[in-house]
Image: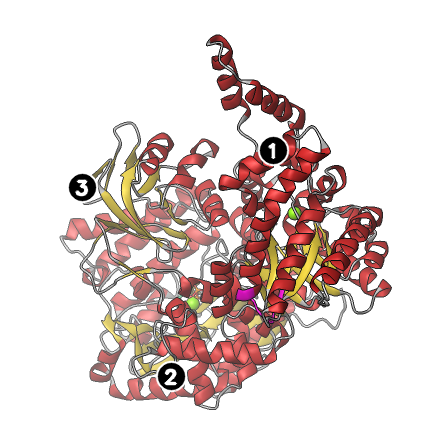
């Protein structure tokens, strides 16, 4: 520890860019001080001091003296000493890390008050009641947060005092009542901690500072950090701030404000004010607040000054700020500011408003929004104009607006949904047994559990609407009913509506309206039109900025012309993944069966010849929908048994036929084939390129279908740009064999049709071995497409279908993952393979085209990563395309 380390900064010494050192709160208090705004003087103990404390178990040796020096300076400035008996300086001790964090210690106000100084405070203020109120607050807050006394004990004593006096609000307790309460509070502390409430002011302060340091390592804070991937060694800063008092009578008060409406972005006066109150009173709901606009009538001078300050802050931070302030006998004090939270819609509107005001440029506007917000705006929503009965509220776990009949078990959910009913699965909590019900339901509602509960994780994975932890709803699974706090009963079959974006739960059917943002992307609403709402205009502008700067192209995963057309409307620049297996289902399944059962080459060829024209027609449509843009077609990937009948069904059929002495030769052969193809671990079995290599003619047929379709389009003056992609390659030899065969087929078609097709041939990189030997594989590939779904499965060694419902919840709860690696690419593991394979591939072939298909292509954080490692494009489901475009723009801006 260097002798020169400075552990304490006066508010006049810091600034807003020192969040690492001073925490968010401290840095912004310093910034406001330097802007000349009225901030009560104080100082900040740095995160460095906290780090030393956490590492060594005691405060750095130099800290005490340094704090003394700053406290001296503060006392001189204020003209009184901390806790001085006849005129005490009081301070607040406030935690403040770089990121605000649940589980960190609450602020303690009024430090410095004691039996000795309480009457001094009363005399100075000329208000006995105020002094005792401040003292009881100190013991209450200090007892709870520093001394770990159960806060309920104080609450109960306070309630009892009010009850005894027959009043309902704290302001109706007089000095005598409060004084008695102080005695009671002191007794509680003594009884619960085995020691008296500390009377020495400096000791109070030091203990509070240490408690803030210690709160860095509460279980809640640790869990939060693991989940959010916040390093565990950042430490928290501590702010010591001289007290100002909003509880000095009706000409005092405290409030919170926003510089503009956090819901719409509109400029105006937004906030709440509470007269004769201190600190948290305004948000704690102990008395009714008044709208901030009313302050103008209560104290015009302070109001005007506040408006002026809000304007200063907005121009200075160039963003919406939220503010905490206090008025002490007509004098306004600023206690906190920070860039404020806002709704998704407001984020877009505010970003463009700020551009129009000339406060930020387009690149900065892109940083003010994100893909998660855009995704939220794309969900259908409840029609807020409609009358609806809200019956509860939980955690908004997975967005969307879902309406359906209440069911209380998975079995009923599946049964009802099979008969065409829409259902909402309601459980206390879900577990892996509920999976089928969750799949069948429109949405999931639970009364227990948070954002990482089973219901929340699985629902997000499925993209299904979910509200969890709606604790005021009493779920009785046995009785198949749910009871609200007001006593409304929802029986099985009653309709409920749940809003996964707000967490609100309604009885009955709330009408759902499509998202205006989707209407806009679909081309059904024009951003330039008169009646387009502000939100659509803002989204339109932001998307234009993003498209202008992004380097990554965005393609769609689409298998048919309809999806392709929609993807194009959403801005897709091609198809990055067309799965051909979908073209083998339905009535074509039988043809696949024939192919598998074929005994002779002639039978096999006949089966393939049947499939060829069907595939070709699919491709022709697709190439037409994506005319002029690349279309990557993946040859058959999944294990063959997926196209065969279920083994149990088939066995039953065969057994029945045998018993009835019916003819069943075909079924028997099929059953044998199914048995033969049965695999313990199909994901790692006969699939992908392996199929192409062991079933002669299969890939050749698919390649021919692609080539014929392309030739047909060409001959019709189309501009097909097909790219043939080989899945599950592990070694370049596999690719070489397939390539040779494919090139031959293509050459044949070109010759037969008299066209030059310019088809490219590439591979997926989705096995660790492929990634590790990418340099070799690139010799035979025109492009790589990283199949990050399978790559994640094979790198981690777990099967997605199994793990998400089984142990992922536990992993998330233990903080092993912050988010599922199937949702956001695991940069350190899977990502590092992508990075090295991309580099190795390009070393072999500098013009190698690189893309990614798989869910990660539409995930905001992953898109940034793919930009950074230099891929050419991402491909994602059509609905995620706008999100990918936006994030690609944000990554490049
Ligand atoms: P949080 O991080 O929970 O917002 P704060 O440190 O901002 O905690 O403090 C909690 C409450 O106490 C806020 O309402 C704040 O305005 C108020 N407060 C903090 N310090 C002081 C002070 N020195 N004088 C008056 N009120 C204060
Ligand atoms: Mg605060
Ligand atoms: Mg795959």
| Quadrant housing the C terminus | bottom right
| Quadrant housing the N terminus | bottom right
Span highlighted in magenta in the image: 624-630
Q: Is residue 828 visible?
A: yes
Ligand 1 location (quadrant): bottom left
Q: Is residue 197 visible?
A: no
Residue 426, label in figure: none
Helix, strand or loop at label 3? It is loop
Residue 476: name its quadrant.
top left
Q: Which comes sooner in the sequence, label 3 or label 2?
A: 3
Q: Which comes sooner in the sequence, label 1 or label 2?
A: 2
Q: Is mark 3 within 8 Å of ligand 1?
A: no
Residue appearing at x 68%, y 72% in the figure: 6
Residue 528, label in figure: 2
**Residues at marks 3 and 1 touching, judged by CB atoms closer than 8 Å:** no
* Residue 758 screen position, x and y as percent: 73, 66
The answer for how far apart the CA atoms under marks 3 and 2 are is: 49 Å
The answer for how far apart the CA atoms under marks 1 and 2 are is: 56 Å
Asked whether 492 or 782 is in front, the reply is 782
* Residue 656 screen position, x and y as percent: 47, 13
Residue 594, label in figure: 1
Q: Is residue 713 above or below residue 404?
A: below
Task: Say left or right for 833 vs 434.
Answer: right
The answer for how far apart the CA atoms under marks 3 and 1 are is: 61 Å
Asked whether 95 or 118 is in front, the reply is 95
Residue 49: name its quadrant.
bottom right
Residue 487, label in figure: 3
Helix, strand or loop at label 2? It is loop
């Amino acid at each position: 520890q260097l002798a020169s380390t400075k552990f304490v900064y006066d508010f006049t010494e810091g600034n807003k860019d020192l969040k690492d050192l001073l925490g968010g709160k401290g840095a912004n208090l310093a910034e406001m001080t330097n802007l000349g705004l009225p901030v009560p003087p104080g100082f900040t103990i740095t995160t460095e001091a906290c780090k030393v404390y956490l590492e060594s178990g005691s405060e750095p040796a130099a800290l005490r003296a340094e704090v003394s020096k700053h406290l001296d300076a503060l006392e001189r400035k204020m003209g009184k000493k901390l806790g001085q008996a006849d005129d005490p300086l009081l301070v607040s001790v406030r935690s403040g890390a770089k990121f605000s964090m649940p589980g960190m210690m609450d602020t303690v106000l009024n430090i410095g008050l004691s039996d000795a100084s309480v009457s001094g405070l009363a005399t100075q203020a000329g208000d006995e009641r105020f002094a005792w109120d401040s003292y009881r607050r100190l013991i209450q807050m200090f007892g709870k947060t520093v001394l770990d006394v159960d806060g309920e004990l104080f609450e109960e004593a306070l309630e009892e005092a009010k009850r005894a006096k027959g009043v309902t609000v704290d302001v109706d307790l007089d000095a005598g009542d409060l004084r008695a309460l102080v005695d009671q509070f002191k007794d509680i502390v003594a009884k619960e901690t085995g020691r008296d409430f500390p009377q020495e002011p400096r000791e109070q302060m030091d203990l509070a500072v240490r408690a803030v340091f210690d709160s860095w390592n509460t279980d809640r804070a640790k869990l939060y950090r693991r989940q959010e991937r916040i390093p565990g060694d950042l430490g928290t800063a501590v702010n010591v701030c001289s007290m100002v008092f909003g509880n000095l009578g009706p000409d005092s008060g405290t409030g919170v404000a926003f510089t503009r409406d956090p819901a719409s972005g509109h400029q105006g006066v937004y906030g709440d004010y509470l007269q004769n109150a201190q600190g948290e009173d305004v948000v704690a709901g102990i008395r009714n607040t008044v709208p901030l606009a009313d302050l103008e009538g209560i104290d015009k001078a302070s109001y005007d000054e506040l408006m002026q300050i809000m304007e200063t802050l907005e121009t200075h931070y160039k963003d919406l700020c939220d503010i905490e302030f206090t008025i002490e006998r007509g004098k306004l004090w600023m206690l906190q500011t920070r860039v404020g939270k806002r709704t998704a819609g407001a984020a877009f509107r505010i970003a463009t408003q700020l551009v129009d005001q000339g406060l930020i440029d387009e690149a900065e506007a892109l940083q003010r929004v994100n893909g998660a917000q855009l995704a939220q705006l794309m969900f259908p929503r409840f029609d807020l104009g409609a009358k609806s009965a809200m019956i509860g509220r939980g955690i908004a776990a997975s967005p969307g607006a879902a309406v359906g009949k209440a069911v209380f078990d998975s079995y009923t959910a599946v049964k009802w949904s099979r008969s065409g009913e829409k259902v909402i699965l309601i459980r206390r909590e879900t577990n892996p047994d509920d999976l089928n019900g969750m799949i069948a339901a429109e949405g999931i509602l639970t009364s227990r559990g948070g954002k990482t509960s089973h219901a929340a994780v699985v629902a997000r994975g499925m993209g299904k609407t979910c509200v969890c932890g709606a604790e005021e709803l009493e779920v009785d699974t046995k009785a198949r009913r749910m009871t609200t706090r007001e006593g409304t009963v929802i029986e099985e079959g009653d309709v409920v509506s749940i809003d996964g974006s707000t967490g609100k739960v309604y009885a009955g059917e709330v009408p759902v309206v499509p998202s205006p943002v989707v209407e806009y992307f679909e081309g059904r609403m024009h951003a330039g039109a008169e009646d387009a709402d502000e939100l659509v205009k803002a989204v339109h502008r932001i998307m234009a900025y993003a498209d202008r700067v992004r380097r990554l192209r965005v393609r769609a995963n689409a298998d048919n012309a309809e999806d392709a057309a929609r993807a194009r409307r959403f801005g897709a620049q091609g198809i990055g993944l067309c799965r051909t297996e979908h073209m083998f289902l339905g009535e074509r399944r039988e043809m696949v069966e024939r192919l598998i059962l074929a005994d002779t080459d002639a039978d096999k060829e006949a089966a393939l010849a049947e499939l060829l024209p069907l595939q070709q027609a699919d491709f022709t449509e697709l190439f037409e929908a994506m005319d002029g843009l690349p279309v990557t077609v993946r040859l058959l990937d999944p294990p063959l048994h997926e196209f065969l009948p279920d083994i149990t069904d088939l066995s039953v059929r065969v057994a029945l036929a045998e018993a009835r002495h019916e003819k069943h030769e075909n079924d028997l052969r099929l059953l044998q084939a199914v048995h033969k193809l049965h695999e313990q671990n199909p994901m790692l079995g006969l699939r992908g390129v392996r199929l192409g290599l062991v079933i002669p003619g299969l890939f050749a047929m698919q390649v021919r279908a692609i080539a014929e379709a392309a030739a047909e389009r060409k001959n019709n003056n189309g501009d097909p740009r097909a790219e043939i992609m080989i899945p599950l390659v592990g070694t370049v030899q596999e690719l070489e064999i397939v390539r040779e065969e494919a090139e031959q087929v293509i050459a044949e078609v070109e010759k037969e049709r008299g066209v030059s097709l310019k088809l490219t041939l590439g591979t997926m990189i989705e096995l660790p071995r492929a990634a590790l030997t990418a340099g070799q594989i690139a010799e035979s590939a025109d492009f790589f497409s990283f199949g990050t779904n399978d790559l994640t499965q094979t790198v981690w060694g777990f099967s997605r279908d199994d793990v998400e419902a089984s142990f992922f919840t536990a992993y998330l709860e233990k903080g092993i993952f912050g988010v599922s690696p199937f949702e956001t690419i695991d940069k350190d593991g899977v990502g590092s393979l992508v990075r090295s394979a991309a580099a190795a591939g390009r070393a072999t072939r500098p013009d190698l085209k690189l893309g990614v298909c798989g869910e990660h292509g539409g995930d905001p954080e992953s898109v940034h990563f793919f930009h950074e490692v230099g891929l050419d494009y991402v491909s994602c489901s059509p609905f995620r395309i706008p999100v990918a475009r936006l994030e690609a723009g944000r990554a490049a801006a």
